[in-house]
Amino acid sequence: MADVRDIMELEQPATPEITRESIIGSDKLKKRTFTTTKVSRRPEGMHREVFALLYNDNKDAPALFPSDTSNGYKQTKIKLGMRKPRKWEWIPFTNPARTDGAVFYHWRRPSDGPKEYPFAKFNKKIEVPTYTDAIYQQHLQSEDWTKEETDHLMDLAQRFDLRFIIMSDRYDTEKFSKRSVEDLKDRYHKVCGTLAKISGEKKVYHYDADHERRRKEQLKRLYDRTPEQIEEEQSLLNELKKIEARKKERERKTQDLQKLISQADNQGDSLRKSDKKLPKKKLANPARPSRVDTSHILQAVETAGIKFPDYKNSGVSLRSQRMKLPANVGQKKSKGIEQMLQEMELELNPTPTEEICLNFNELRSDMVLHMELKAALATCEFELQSLRHQYEALNPGKSLAIPPQLLSSTTEQDGTKLIGNAEIIDVVGSPGTPSGSGT
């Protein structure tokens, strides 16, 4: 461009002279410019700690800048209106519920105007019926009450709004005989009921004075009980609860035993039917029963008394495990079985062959059934003796004779029981052993 300008004889702009400083640069450091931020001042009346929470160390703007700081953070005075207050006047008034003409005063605005006393509507009066001399002579005469005494009673009812306790206290005992509260109520309700029938009302209120006297007498006796009597009554209630609980337990055990006996009978019938259908070859050799016969017999034993586990799973198992008593057999039942085995002079743990296992389990199941039947017999005898005592208590001088065939050999006619092995092996819980629990 410079050559073209020279040919065209054009003027060239003056260029600065090239120097060392223009190429390398000067050694002087450039001055740094700082921008100053506006610092907010703490408003008047604000605590320094509160103001410090609004700002951080970098003096950033607060997250919530105060919008109204004209009056500062000071409690402003109330601004009262310039309107003129309404006037109140001390005005007299009367209560329409009162008949003595009493005058009272209260504050009221003149603009409200005179109004009826608002609390006069709560003055409810009871309407006491009235009667004439002719009605009294014809319908209300009584041998115990005179007309003057009846008039005095109705006057008290009108004055004291049927508050019979106050009426009894204000009753004129000098002029009339002393009356109880029940007597006053009885006479008043009889008069009201008679007048209601005369006027044709269908709903008539009846008052039972004798029932009210008995009720108050019972409450008085209940209140006058001594601490010893209260304790005795509580103990009797506890004994009654125990008797009811034992009765329910005996009924439950009786029902369970009846179900057990019925199931055993049904199972025995089914076994006899199945035995008739078996071939003669299988019945000819009963010494070694087959697996099918064993399962039927075990099922009958389980239904009768003890339910022994049935090992049908594949694999090797000890035959002695079949003679082990189940866990649901109680400790008392186990002890009873051991005692009966000792009395029979049998081993507690015989050799566990297949036949011995079957017969030994059946024997112990029959022992448990024998115990439960004996407990049921004791329960029935106890109920029979209880009924006999109740009959003799309701009919004094008469005695109820129980036939001997209904009593066991260990029970006498008077209800006492002879002590024997039955008391030792009674594990189900008969009336003679209140702590007996089968399982």
Image: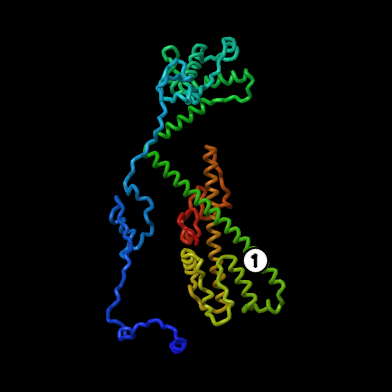
- Few, some or many residues within 10 Å of mark 1 (<14, 14–19, 20+): some
> Residue 355: where, in percent of width, then height?
58, 77
* Vertical placement of residue 152 versus 81, above or below: above
Q: Nearer the viewer, residue 129 or 263?
A: 129
Give percent across and percent down for residue 362: 57, 70
Looking at the rendered structure, the secondary structure element under dot 1 is: helix
Amino acid identity at mark 1:
Gln
* Drawn side of residue 299 relative to residue 155, left or right: right
Residue 182 in view, yes or no: no
What residue appears at the point 53 percent right and 26 percent down from the top-left corner? 208
**Location of residue 172 with respect to 359 vertically, above or below:** above
Residue positioned most to the front: 9
> In the image shown, does 216 or 96 lie closer to the viewer?
96
Kindly identify which residue carries mark 1.
Answer: 267
Q: Quadrant of residue 142?
A: top right
Q: How many marks?
A: 1
Q: Residue 104 placed where, x, y %?
A: 41, 20
Q: Which residue lies at the image location 42% right of the left edge and 17% below the top edge?
A: 103
Q: Quadrant of residue 131?
A: top right
Q: Nearer the viewer, residue 94 or 33?
A: 33
Eyeballing the image, is 364 above or below 233?
below
Quadrant (top left, top right, bottom left, bottom right) of the N terminus: bottom left
Q: On the rendered structure, is 319 left or right of 22? A: right
Pick the front one: 356 or 301: 301
Q: Residue drawn 38% across and 57% down?
A: 64
